[in-house]
Amino acid sequence: MSPEIVSQLSVGGSTLVLLGGLMMLWRRGVAAHIGAFTFQSVALAATMAMVGWFAGDWQLWAVAVLLLLVKGIGIPLLLKRMGRRFGSERELEPYVNTATSLLIGGLLVLLAYIVTAPLVSVSRLPTRTGMPLAIGLVFVSLFIIISRKKALTQVLGFLMLENGIALLAVLGTHGIPIIVEIGVFLDVALGFIVMQVFVYQIHETFESIDVEQLNRLRE
Amino acid sequence: MTATSAPFLTLLLPPLVAALLALVLPPRRLLSGAVHAALALLSLGAALGLVHLVLDGGTPTWGPTDLFRVDALSALLAVCVAFVTTLSALLGPGPGREQHYTPAQIRRFRVFASLFAFTMLVAVTANNVGVMWIAIEATTIVSAVIVPLTVSKASVEASWKYILIGSVGIALAFVGTVLGYFDFVTLVGQRESALNWTVLLANARVLHPPVIELAFVFILIGYGTKAGLAPMHTWLPDAHSEAPSALSAMMSGVLLAVALYAIIRWKAVVASVVGPVFPNRLLVGLGLLSLAIAALSLVIQRQYKRLLAYSSIEHTGLMCMGLALGPLGVFASMLHLVNHTVAKSMMFFLSGRILDRYGTPEIGSVCGLLRVMPWTGGLFAAGMLALLGLPPFGMFLSEFTLLRAGFADGQGGLMAVVLVFLAVAFVSLLGHLNRMLYGAAPAEVRLGEGSRWAVLPLAGCAAALVVLGVAVPAPMTALLHRIVEIAGR
């Protein structure tokens, strides 16, 4: 593959990954959100495999397969189980309405381009063109976490944040050392499982997973 | 290889073994508790052994591509972690305590507290910034599991805030780590050891300042969240007040210090890329903000465990500022870290005793403490005075040195502001303490100390604070001087 095509594909793949994050902002309902996350994870795995092919790095292939299995299949299955349990809960208006959310999302991506300008200028890798979009996803995920009221949506925001970082790592460095990569994977999986337990616990103690209920601990 | 692996294995294996044994041993047996404590003690011994090795001029490394490496800074933190872990093994949930935990709860606590200790020890001995990040992220996961040891609305809420804010914060630190690695790879090329401190530091001169500055902002926000620096501190008072006291002691006493450790490591790299001005300005800013918010929040607190939590934010803020005040500042900051570890863990164990006896976390409902539990009350008062920075306790010395470092660094105005906030904290803590110590004891509260042996290790902590305040032991001074060489560039 010529570097130009790789560069194009990086931007294309990153755009799809970021799109998964933006879908969270305009779509409602647990099922749609889980779909957005699954879509994003598959796009991320594909981007990773593409970079792995270009760089001739089998480790990236392995990581892409692992990612597809864990984030593309495993976690969505668990999420769907949670969705069946809590999906019937009344949808709440987020703190910020859809139109404003999308506007803020766009501004955050713009901000990401400004912040990452020094990164893109120092790198010589053809994949660098996607880096602003990865940081954009990091910002958008942060916004999802702070602006949504359901614990389940916040977990999804966190998982997307992790996807954004994984995208940043693969585009900017063609993969962090494998031992770190595996450790990060374990952490994400464990963290997700504990968060899932907590969501069930919140549901049991508060009879809702609306985090607005979590306001007991105030001065 | 085998010669150097021994200290690492004796440091890191005991907590893992303790976690496994806690799974199978009957939790209510005294023997299980003794085994648990002995393993923690073994790890503490190994940490002290590492201090000895470091003072002899060695920097032991272990593993492929020197995955683990202990210098003076790592050794100091390892001792702190192992010390509080030992205290928590001795005084945490178990049989013969006043608090009534079910066997399942005791088992759960022992398993996860041991894993918590393990992850913190890995974090401070890892040479690889990626492995350090993995370990610190894991601290959040394993400790969040036991925050709601007793399930209540408040503890579930606290643990949710903790794991969500903690995980998000730490994820941002990973963005910073990736950016640092990105810059390295761009310049030097891919290498397995590229994430090692030693390699990063050696290549610092060629790294790009704008990229590293951006990386440090992410790292500071990320690890700052775990360290409880304002404005990312919002999870801390909730988690520290709702967790079982032995866990609060570990979180407040050493987890904050471990997060600060990560910041110190990165600061050394960043300072050799872009010079000290940029990181110092950020550290002073966050430190001062934490100090200010904590001091003002102390005034309005109504619960004593929250009081201690805000006091942790205050002291972390001080340490953070000290790091930016030249070599003397770093010295003071590290001395302060040791003092805070001892004082704050002692205070959380004592507040656990108070909570068990009075059955209420409210300051207003606790009176006559000196009459109800003379030893606990006396030590609580001593610990509070230590936290206030009064002589003869160690924090007087470290705070005084810190202020002196600030004035010597030409930051007189800043130090004046610091003094104002310290005074605010002083007055409000003293007021709260007074309310708890004196007055008539509530009629329904039983008088007398109860499980008196447990007072002994805590009295030991108070004695250690006095020793640290009267004359810092020579080996510790030597260790701190070595840390200044590492972190005080």
Image (tube, helix red, strand yellow):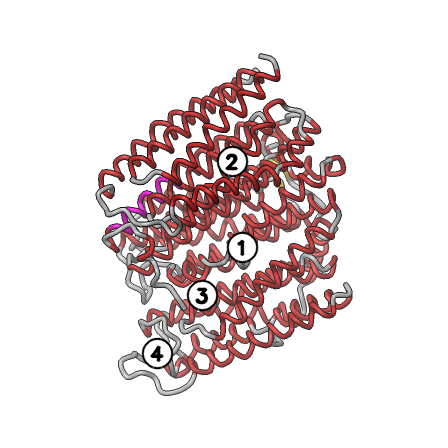
Q: Nearer the viewer, mark 2 or mark 4?
A: 2
Label 3, label 2: how far apart the Cα atoms are: 37 Å
Would residue B4 be seen by someone viewing this image from the given angle?
Answer: no
Q: Nearer the viewer, mark 3 or mark 2?
A: 2
| Residue type (three-letter) at the residue carrying disc 2 | Ile
Q: Nearer the viewer, mark 1 or mark 3?
A: 1
Specify the farthest residue to the top: A1
Q: Is residue B348 left or right of residue B146?
A: right
Q: Secondary structure at mark 3?
A: helix
Q: Nearer the viewer, mark 3 or mark 4?
A: 4
Residue A43 position in % (x across, y down): 44, 25
Q: What secondary structure prevails in the magenta region?
A: helix
Q: Check disc 4: other Cα within 10 Å, few if <14, some if 14-19, many if 20+.
A: some
Q: Could you tell which of marks 4 and 1 lies nearer the N-terminus?
A: 1
| Residue type (three-letter) at the residue carrying disc 4 | Ser
Residue B475 position in % (x across, y down): 68, 58
**Which residue is rendered at x = 29% and y = 59% of the image?**
B153
The answer to whether marks 2 and 4 sit on the same chain is no
Q: Secondary structure at mark 2?
A: helix
The answer to whether marks 2 and 1 sit on the same chain is no
Q: Are the residues at dot 1 and dot 3 in contact (C-beta closer than 8 Å)?
A: no
Judging from the image, mark 3 belongs to the subunit labelled B
Q: Check disc 1: other Cα within 10 Å, few if <14, some if 14-19, many if 20+.
A: many
The answer to whether marks 1 and 3 sit on the same chain is yes
Judging from the image, mark 1 belongs to the subunit labelled B
Magenta range is A191-203
Residue A176, disc: none
Residue that label 4 marks = B365
Residue that label 1 marks = B227
